[in-house]
Amino acid sequence: DSPNTYCESLIDYLRKIFKCLKMLDDGPKAMLYFSICGHVTERMVNIITGKYEDTDSKKSKSNSGLSPISKIDAFGLKNLSIDVQALEIFADGTGLLQLRTCF
């Protein structure tokens, strides 16, 4: 089994972003890695739940841009699990310990 195309594209994009960040010192680089991966995870959860917390107004809103998932079956959960595993493997490849915990 392999991750869906969107997840593969996202991982390729993250690789390019992280490659650009390699020149930073370890502290700021690690902070950015965790922030970026945390944002990805937050968006995945938002798509599933259909809600997100707007940090400016602190009001719950529908997830902008993407339709929330109204139903998910066992096949969908399996595919989501495969995507998360691919993201964890990507995180392990960065060399930053515990980055996989973001996913």
Image (cartoon, rainbow, N blue to C red):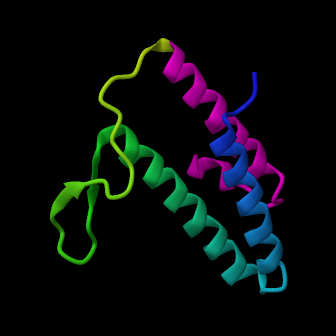
Instruction: Name the quadrant containing residue 57.
Output: bottom left
Secondary structure predominantly adopted by residues drawn in magenta: helix
Q: Decide: is 46 above or below 95.
A: above
Left or right: where 3 falls relative to 93:
left
Depth check: 56 or 99 in front?
56
Q: Decide: is 94 above or below 73.
A: below
Residue 93, image x, y percentages:
84, 52
Magenta span contains residue 91: yes
Residue 64, image x, y percentages:
32, 58
Magenta residues (range)? 75-103
Residue 18, image x, y percentages:
76, 70
Left or right: where 73 falls relative to 93:
left
Instruction: Name the quadrant containing residue 67.
Output: top left
Instruction: Name the quadrant containing residue 95.
Output: bottom right
Residue in the image at 26% along x and 61% along y: 53
Residue 2, image x, y percentages:
75, 28
Residue in the image at 37% along x and 57% along y: 65
Left or right: where 23 falls relative to 40:
right
Residue in the image at 71% along x and 50% along y: 9
